[in-house]
Amino acid sequence: MSGAAYLVAAAVVAGLVTFALRALPFALLRPLRESALVARLAVWMPAGVLTILALVMLLDAAALAPGAPVDGTRVLHALVAAAVTVAVHLLAGRRTLLSIAAGTLAYVLLINTP
């Protein structure tokens, strides 16, 4: 096989694989809509995601970097950001992405202010 034919064949195969991988979720969507497991996950996943993010943030704040002063401000910042996340989640109609973004923004702003 010549160099040009090989390149064309490789591009065609890559294009077909890319198309198949992008079309596969849409093909699987119909059976998943009727699944009881997916319906249950849709109810519990937002709370699960928020819980995991809060735990990771709090554990990261509690595990201070070596040599950092132990003054508790990182833990306080993490608790304030967690409270912001919960407040936005409850006040903004339980919009998960909005509450995650607000909590993340609060945490980043708090740890980067002198």
Image (cartoon, helix red, strand yellow):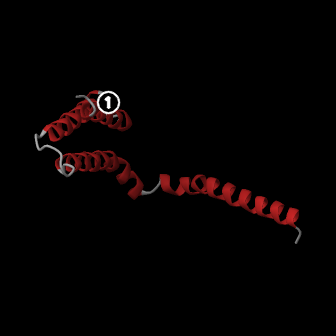
**Is 16 positioned to the left or the right of 106 in the image?**
right
Provide residue 83's location: percent of width, then percent of height. 20, 34
* 58 or 48: nearer the viewer: 58
Tell me where residue 18 sits by quadrant.
Answer: bottom right
Quadrant of the frame with the N terminus:
bottom right
Q: Is residue 101 above or below residue 54?
A: above
Q: Residues within 10 Å of mark 1 (few under 14, many from 20)?
A: few
**Is 28 positioned to the left or the right of 81 in the image?**
right
* 26 or 67: nearer the viewer: 67
Name the secondary structure under disc 1: loop
Q: How many marks?
A: 1
Q: Read off the residue under disc 1.
A: 93
**Is 92 positioned to the left or the right of 68 in the image?**
right
* 11 or 109: nearer the viewer: 109
The residue positioned 47% from the left and 54% from the top of the image is: 34
Tell me where residue 15 sits by quadrant.
Answer: bottom right
Q: Is residue 24 above or below residue 68?
A: below
The residue positioned 33% from the left and 45% from the top of the image is: 46
Quadrant of the frame with the C terminus:
top left
The residue positioned 32% from the left and 30% from the top of the image is: 93
